[in-house]
Image (cartoon, helix red, strand yellow):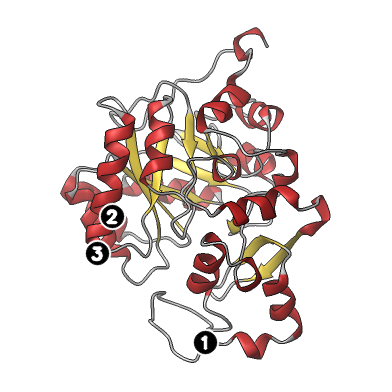
């Protein structure tokens, strides 16, 4: 099969592959740079980062990616510092901004001011068309099989059929890529590109602790569950002691203090702390987000190996 040629505004990666931005600090400069070096689009998960930290991670990514590498950020609209972090990234000459976990018109105003392409993550034809009208350079259409926060119960392939061909900007499919067959099924819908997260989270270049990676690799298919995130969206996570506590003694997890890092939060537990605990290797007290098809991945990979898995013999298919 012939790979589509993904072009987002003036940006044209060698391969139509975007690495999902996985918070908190799973996707940092090392991972984003390695993906960009291989010819995809690498994303730094910027939510929760300080200005100095973000600038450092962008610098690391640029050094790894080389002159032609495309580096973007992923940011949660739900974050209190959404505007500040987005401006910091744009002032640091980031190539593009992908925004999810909410929707805001402010993103498009910043895009015009700084001349940086923006790509909202959407889960409906209505949101896709609004994004196009407001000036989005592309949309990431994320279906139910994705990891982390979910804005729809519609499966990825079904959702893509309602959007591909109905907007005039590039459509990137996301959610449910555990192997090449999943990748090809999304491409077969006519998308311009595919966003891949879980495969890249289980690479040597991912910033997650080895205990985080081993927990995912050792989990069984039935260990995946949906939880209600304090952000207000369902979340897809892998069973662990933390989720047992959340189910059996939820009051014990209510934070005693709050940094107000999210615009809207039920405060049922501190999701930022839970994600960070797991990312640092404290699996018992952390939340491990992952895509539905994590169980198809059998070993720790490198970014280069992920590209080989997705693209092997693809021209002969």
Q: Residues within 10 Å of mark 1 (few under 14, many from 20)?
A: few
Question: Residue 84 has which mark?
Answer: 3
Which quadrant would the N terminus be assigned to in this image? top right
Residue 27's x, y, as percent?
Answer: 45, 49
Using the image, determine if residue 130 lies above or below residue 82: above
Q: Are marks 3 and 2 in contact (CB under 8 Å)?
A: no
Secondary structure found at label 2: helix
Residue at 44% in and 89% down: 257
On screen, residue 172 versus residue 135, left or right, reads right
Q: Nearer the viewer, residue 117 or 149?
A: 149
Q: Is residue 222 left or right of residue 270?
A: right
Q: Determine if residue 121 is in view.
A: yes
Identify the image quadrant of the C terminus. Answer: top right
Give the residue drawn at x 23%, y 60%. 51
Q: Secondary structure at mark 1?
A: loop
Q: To which quarter of the image does residue 109 belong?
A: bottom left
Which of the marked residues, 2 or 1, is nearer the chain's N terminus?
2
- Of labels 3 and 2, the one closer to you: 2
Which residue lies under the disc numbered 2? 54
Q: Is residue 256 positioned above or below 198 on the image?
A: below
Q: Which badge, 3 or 2, is on the more N-terminal residue?
A: 2
Mark 2 to mark 1: distance in Å? 27 Å
Is there a contact, CB below 8 Å, between mark 3 and mark 1?
no
* Percent position of residue 233, x then y: 58, 68
Q: Which mark is residue 141?
A: none
Which residue in the structure is indicated by mark 1? 255
For residue 104, side relative to residue 142 (left or right) = left
Secondary element under disc 3, as helix, strand or loop, is helix
Residue 71 location in percent, x, y? 33, 38
* Residue at figure coordinates x 56%, y 76% from the top left: 230
The x and y percentages for residue 163 are: 56, 40
């Amino acid at each position: 099969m012939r790979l589509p040629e993904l072009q987002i505004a003036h940006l044209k990666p060698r391969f139509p592959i975007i690495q999902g931005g996985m918070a908190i600090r799973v996707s940092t400069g090392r991972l984003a740079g390695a993906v960009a070096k291989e010819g995809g689009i690498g994303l730094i998960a910027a939510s929760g980062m300080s200005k100095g930290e973000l600038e450092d991670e962008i610098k690391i990514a640029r050094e790894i990616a080389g002159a032609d590498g495309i580096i973007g950020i992923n940011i949660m609209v739900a974050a209190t510092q959404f505007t500040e972090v987005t401006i910091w990234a744009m002032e640091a000459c980031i190539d593009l901004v992908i925004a999810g976990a909410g929707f805001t018109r402010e993103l498009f105003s910043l895009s015009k001011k700084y001349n940086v392409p923006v790509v909202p993550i959407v889960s409906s034809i209505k949101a896709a068309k609004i994004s196009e009208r407001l000036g989005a350079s592309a949309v990431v259409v994320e279906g139910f099989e994705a990891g982390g926060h979910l804005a729809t119960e519609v499966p990825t392939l079904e959702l893509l059929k309602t959007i591909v061909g109905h907007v005039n900007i590039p459509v990137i499919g996301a959610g449910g890529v555990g192997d090449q067959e999943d990748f090809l099924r999304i491409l077969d819908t006519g998308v311009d590109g595919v966003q891949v997260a879980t495969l890249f989270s289980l690479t040597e270049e991912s910033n997650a602790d080895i205990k985080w990676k081993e927990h995912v690799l050792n989990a069984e298919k039935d260990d995946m569950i949906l939880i209600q995130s304090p952000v207000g969206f369902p979340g897809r996570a892998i069973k662990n002691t933390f989720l047992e506590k959340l189910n059996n003694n939820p009051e014990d997890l209510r934070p005693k203090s709050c940094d107000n890092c999210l615009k809207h939060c039920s405060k049922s537990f501190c999701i930022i702390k839970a994600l960070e605990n797991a990312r640092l290797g404290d699996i018992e007290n952390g939340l491990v987000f992952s895509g539905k098809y994590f169980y198809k991945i059998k070993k720790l990979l490198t970014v280069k190996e992920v590209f080989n898995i997705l693209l092997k013999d693809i021209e002969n298919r």
